[in-house]
Image: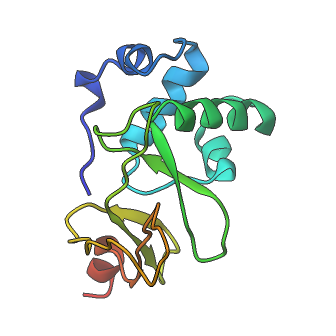
């Protein structure tokens, strides 16, 4: 789980590359995703902002980000919707999420696990598989270190 050096990232350019307008809120929102190493819920997003904003505006921006391949929805322990950054292979045409998600049973965060080998599933008794989701449950790196 890699944190990014936000000094070297042009968040406005990221929005432009994904066909999104560069509003100040959208720049702040995408920066928030780049600086967190775990997924975020809408309430966590609002809590992390240094200014008041209504949930409708947050949901509108999140929907635009998801539609344009910047973020994707991820599970959590309470079955709430959380959002995480997409990998570079996602676009507005198609999301490609060939990774697992770890649900930490200690801190309740959801992490994208990109180095987990996903099995190839071609068919399953006549079903056509459109999407494969793998959820791992356990302890994240930070929680493991706090027990040492």
- Asked if residue 85 lies left or right of residue 42, the reply is left
- As displayed, is residue 92 above or below residue 44? above
Task: Say how many tags the image has.
Answer: 0
Quadrant of the rendered image containing residue 124: bottom left
**Which residue is situated farthest in the front direction here?**
126
Nearer the observer, 51 or 53: 53
In the rendered image, which quarter contains the N terminus? bottom left
- As displayed, is residue 25 above or below residue 60? above
Quadrant of the rendered image containing residue 122: bottom left
The answer to whether residue 41 shows anywhere in this view is: yes
Quadrant of the rendered image containing residue 7: top left
What's the colour scheme?
rainbow
- Asked if residue 57 lies left or right of residue 90, the reply is right
Q: Residue at x 58, y 43 (%)?
A: 48
Q: Residue at x 44, y 69 (%)?
A: 133
Q: Residue at x 39, y 64 (%)?
A: 111
Q: Residue 127 location in percent, x, y?
A: 49, 74
In the rendered image, which quarter contains the C terminus? bottom left
- As displayed, is residue 142 above or below residue 56? below
The answer to whether residue 50 shows anywhere in this view is: no
Q: Residue 140 location in percent, x, y?
A: 34, 75
- Asked if residue 75 lies left or right of residue 112, the reply is right
Q: Residue 120 location in percent, x, y?
A: 26, 71
Nearer the observer, 29 or 81: 81
């Amino acid at each position: 789980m890699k944190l990014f050096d936000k000094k070297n990232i042009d968040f406005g350019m990221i929005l432009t590359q994904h066909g999104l307008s560069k509003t100040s809120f959208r720049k702040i929102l995408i920066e928030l995703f780049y600086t967190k190493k775990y997924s975020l819920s809408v309430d966590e997003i609002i809590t992390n902002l240094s200014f008041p904003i209504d949930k409708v505006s947050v949901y509108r921006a999140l929907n635009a980000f998801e539609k344009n391949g910047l973020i994707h929805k991820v599970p959590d322990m309470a079955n709430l919707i959380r959002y995480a950054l997409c990998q570079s292979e996602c676009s507005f045409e198609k999301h490609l999420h060939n990774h697992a998600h770890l649900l930490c049973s200690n801190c309740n965060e959801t992490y994208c696990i990109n180095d987990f080998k996903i099995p190839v599933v071609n068919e399953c008794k006549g079903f056509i598989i459109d999407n494969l989701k793998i959820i791992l449950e356990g302890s994240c790196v930070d929680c493991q270190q706090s027990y040492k």
